[in-house]
């Protein structure tokens, strides 16, 4: 397979001082698309990305990361790679998850900048030139801001909005609101993220944590073209837990607050019980009040243990030192499929 190429664009914050020589050193743009059972969307994704990149007249490469698909997406990716030298296949040995698939794309991309895009076409490839334009102005992270969200239930919209705002308030890093993984990253940012190998990954938080000059571009997020969402409520909840535990100590602090509240209630209850006993009131006689107090304290303790367990479990996963993913096939330097790869 022959050699490959790339490109990028973005609303936001940070200095607008142009980056010296940005256009001159921009020789390749990487497009990274994680794939999990997207056989119906793959042809359209490839067509639209190809059309955009051809119009931009830049060298580019399209990294399709197959995250253990079972619907024929794997063979479709291989077929595209055989017919177009711009396509780089990365085939996982099993499903490792969306965030890990994006990480694999960042590991293997060769561009001076990379655009992360979902394969369901809710993130329009036509926005890539806008992201690139902002990159040329000197921004090193250009994220796409969801101004409108089509095809989503009220529950998904409400929970997503609440998630972004809670994360923004309780984490140590100010993660932009209403922003997903659709973004452009400069090579310097990519190399920095490649050094961060934590297993429970929340890439949009990691991209905010590294700093650099960042800005955003608003866009309308359309409904999924085909197939079903790969982020049901269970996976969204897991991603939220990774975001909170990876960037905030608030849950641990919450356990402390609950302890102080229960202790304070106990202290306040002592004089109340004494006074009611002295005046002969029967409110606190019997087992009901004792049972309520025991259940309350037991609940606080179990919640605190659960929070501690989440953090300890993540420490255990990190201590094992296993690779983030196992790849059955990866591209070699000349673009040809290589053998099995382990990525730590």
Image (cartoon, rainbow, N blue to C red):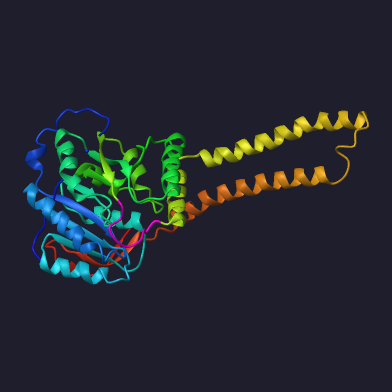
Q: Nearer the viewer, residue 279 or 328?
A: 279
Does residue 218 sit above or below 109 in this rendering?
A: above
Residue 308 falls left or right of residue 173: right
Instruction: Give the answer, above or below, for where 192 lies relative to 86.
Output: above
Number of numbered discs = 0
Q: Secondary structure of the magenta portion, mostly? A: loop
Q: At 19% across and 50% down in the image, what residue appears? A: 125
In what quadrant of the picture does the C terminus appear?
bottom left
Is residue 9 visible to us here?
A: no
Identity of the residue drawn at 22% across and 60% down: 64
Q: Confirm whether the magenta stretch covers residue 272.
A: no
Placement of 206 over or under 340, stated as above or below: above
Q: Position of residue 149 (x, y in %)?
A: 33, 45
Magenta segment: 223-231
Q: Would residue 35 appear left or right of 232 to someone viewing this image?
A: left
> How far from the left and from the top, in percent, is residue 128?
18, 46
């Amino acid at each position: 397979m022959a050699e490959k190429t790339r490109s990028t664009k973005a609303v936001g914050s940070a200095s607008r001082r142009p980056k010296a020589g940005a256009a001159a050193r921009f020789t390749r743009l990487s497009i990274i698309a994680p794939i999990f059972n997207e056989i119906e969307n793959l042809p359209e994704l490839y067509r639209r990305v190809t059309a955009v990149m051809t119009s931009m007249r830049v060298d580019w490469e399209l990294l399709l990361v197959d995250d253990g698909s079972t619907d024929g997406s794997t063979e479709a990716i291989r077929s595209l790679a055989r017919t177009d030298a711009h396509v780089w296949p990365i085939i996982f040995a099993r499903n490792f998850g969306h965030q890990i698939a994006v990480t694999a794309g960042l590991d293997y991309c060769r561009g001076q900048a990379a655009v992360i895009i979902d394969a369901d076409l809710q993130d329009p490839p036509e926005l890539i030139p806008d992201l690139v334009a902002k990159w040329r102005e000197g921004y090193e992270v250009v994220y796409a801001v969801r101004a409108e969200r089509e095809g989503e239930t009220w529950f998904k919209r409400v929970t997503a909005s609440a998630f972004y705002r809670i994360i923004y308030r309780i984490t140590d890093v100010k993660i932009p609101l209403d922003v997903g993984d659709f973004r452009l990253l400069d090579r310097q940012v990519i190399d920095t993220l490649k050094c961060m190998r934590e297993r429970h990954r929340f890439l949009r938080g990691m991209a905010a944590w590294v700093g650099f000059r960042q800005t955003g571009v608003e866009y309308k997020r359309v409904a999924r073209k085909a197939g079903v969402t790969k982020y049901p409520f269970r996976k969204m909840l897991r991603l939220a837990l990774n975001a909170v535990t990876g960037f905030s100590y608030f849950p641990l602090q919450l356990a402390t607050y609950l302890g102080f509240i229960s202790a304070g209630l106990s202290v306040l209850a002592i004089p109340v019980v004494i006074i009611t006993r002295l005046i002969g009131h029967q409110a606190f006689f019997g087992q009901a009040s004792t049972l309520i107090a025991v259940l309350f304290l037991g609940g606080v303790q179990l919640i605190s243990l659960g929070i501690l367990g989440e953090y300890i479990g993540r420490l255990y996963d990190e201590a094992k030192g296993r690779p983030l993913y196992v790849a059955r096939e990866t591209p070699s330097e000349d673009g040809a499929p290589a053998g099995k790869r382990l990525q730590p």
